[in-house]
Amino acid sequence: MTHSPLPTPHSPLPTPSPPDLLSSQRMLQADSLYKTFILHHQGGAQIPVLQGVSLTVQTGECVALQGPSGSGKSTLMRSLYANYRIDTGDIWVKHQGTWVNLPALEPHELLSVRQHTLGYVSQFLRVIPRVPAVEVAAEPLEELGVDSESAYAKVKGLFQRLNLPERLWYLSPTTFSGGEKQRVNIAKAFAVDYPIMLLDEPTSALDATNREVVMQLIEERKAQGCAMVGIFHDDEVRERVCDRVLNFG
Amino acid sequence: MQPLLTVNHLSKYYGDLCACDRISFSLYPGQVLGIIGESGSGKSTLLKAIAGQLPIDAGEITYCDRAHQLINLRTLAEARRRKLMKTEWGFVQQNPRDGLRMTVTAGANIGERLLDIGDRHYANIRAEAMDWLNQVEIPDGRMDDFPSTFSGGMQQRLQLARILVTRPRIVLMDEPTGGLDVSVQARLLDLMRSLVRTLHLSVILVTHDIGVVRLLAHRLMVMQNGQVVEAGLTDQVLDDPQHPYTQQLVSATLIP
């Protein structure tokens, strides 16, 4: 009598494995990212933006994303912050001594990664009207449990370095100019010692003096071991602060 | 981190109409969860069902109380449920007239929740009421006025004070900024944001206002026809909406 063989279970899909822990210099590793936007109300148009992008960033290193508009650098940047959700791929981030894969995290875990590990200098500043600039910029520190006094002191120090006039510190940034808003954003992100920072055109609205200040801030952070990824339209800034370029398009 | 509240496959029917279709989510301490969707999407029904104001047809609601006991809210005895709602939960109504007692003074509105949980020391109650009026930015001098003499924004802030005086851990809000004009809304949003942080509140916020969730909510669920069609971090859902309904909602907003 012959037995039909028991069905063999499908071998499980290879679970993504974190980057080699021995390479302790590595802070961020994105593997084969794919992202297509589907516009349901515009005839279901499909726009493939990321097609197998990979990127590794070491401690103390700044990588520039470069390419023409629409080539996907902003999409990658936002995906690295888990602001955009990628279709496939892994984004490994060294968070409090362990590797976490952003696309696999629960929302509350992502919030913790953003709070402690991933800083982001956005091009936009969204605030509740009425909340003064100093409070806006101190919020990430306060959320980490730093007392208001120390948080405000740190932020004011940064405002001073960034030449934000003191009369603006206690006003809501809603009516600030582009350059003033940008400096509030920079102070907000640089107030926390994030191990990884993402910079989305951090100097786009700044004059030469303040551009210099921001370049110095970036260089100081790199010297402290911060791993950075940035989009810089200003060639001079990019050439000075970046160690490598990832080309798009 | 342990969730404070876990909702698992909650369903609610009105006759044949499924108002909430197998809704599941967890709420973590200190988090604001926004729920958006158009009228009739089931978001207010969900909120009422969670608060035990409506019986549910299926599913479980589990709450981790102050003593770290897991409580099954669906099977909890009514008397205990009421007590819990007064001590550990708060519900902010869209219309402050539904959440306040209009025939007693502002101070008494706040004091009443303390009396409810057994505080009998009149001077303490009055001091607490005064403290809470200050926290919600209502001048001391209005303490003995009736809420009917307050503006809409002040009434809504008084409702917050009335609820927060018993130090709830979870606050459910149904369109708390609805019906207020924009400058009054901004003040209330600012106040709610700072209260969430200083009191470490967990909030479920139902609204149809994308601007409100953008500024207040850490996480977002989008409801349509009784189902959660999309969920994630607030900025994920609003900046990279995936579901056709969410895309429509976001693109229809002037400043999302």
Image (tube, grey):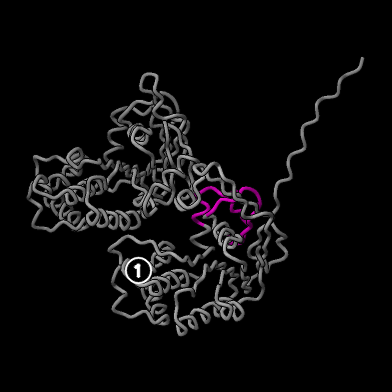
Give yes or no for residue A160 being in the magenta stretch: no
B51 displayed left or right of B248: left
Of residues A28 and B18, the one drawn nearer to the viewer in this rendering: B18
Of residues A2 and A249, the one drawn nearer to the viewer in this rendering: A249
Residue A152 lies, with reference to residue B150, above or below; the image says: below
Task: Tell me if I can see residue A190 in this picture.
Answer: yes
Q: Residue furthest bottom?
A: A209
B83 displayed left or right of A222: left
Tell me the kind of residue under disc 1: Ser
Q: Residue B230: where, in percent of width, then height?
A: 48, 41
Q: Residue A43: where, in percent of width, then height?
A: 53, 41
For the point 62% across and 74% down, which residue is it? A60
A62 displayed left or right of A168: right
Q: Residue furthest right?
A: A1
The quadrant of the picture occupied by the C terminus of chain A is: bottom right
Residue B215 lies, with reference to residue B78, above or below; the image says: below
Q: Residue furthest top?
A: A1
Q: Quadrant of residue B104?
A: top left
* Mark 1 nearby-residue class (10 Å; few <14, some 14–19, many ≥20): some
The quadrant of the picture occupied by the N terminus of chain A is: top right
Name the element at disc 1: helix
Task: Tell me if I can see residue B88 in this picture.
Answer: no
Q: Chain of mark 1?
A: A
**Part of the protein shown in magenta:** A84-112
For the point 74% across and 45% down, which residue is it? A14
Q: Quadrant of residue A95?
A: bottom right
Of residues B207 and A66, the one drawn nearer to the viewer in this rendering: A66
Q: Residue B133: where, in percent of width, then height?
A: 17, 54
For the point 47% across and 53% down, which residue is it? B239
Residue designated by label 1: A148
Q: Residue B92: where, in percent of width, then height?
A: 26, 43
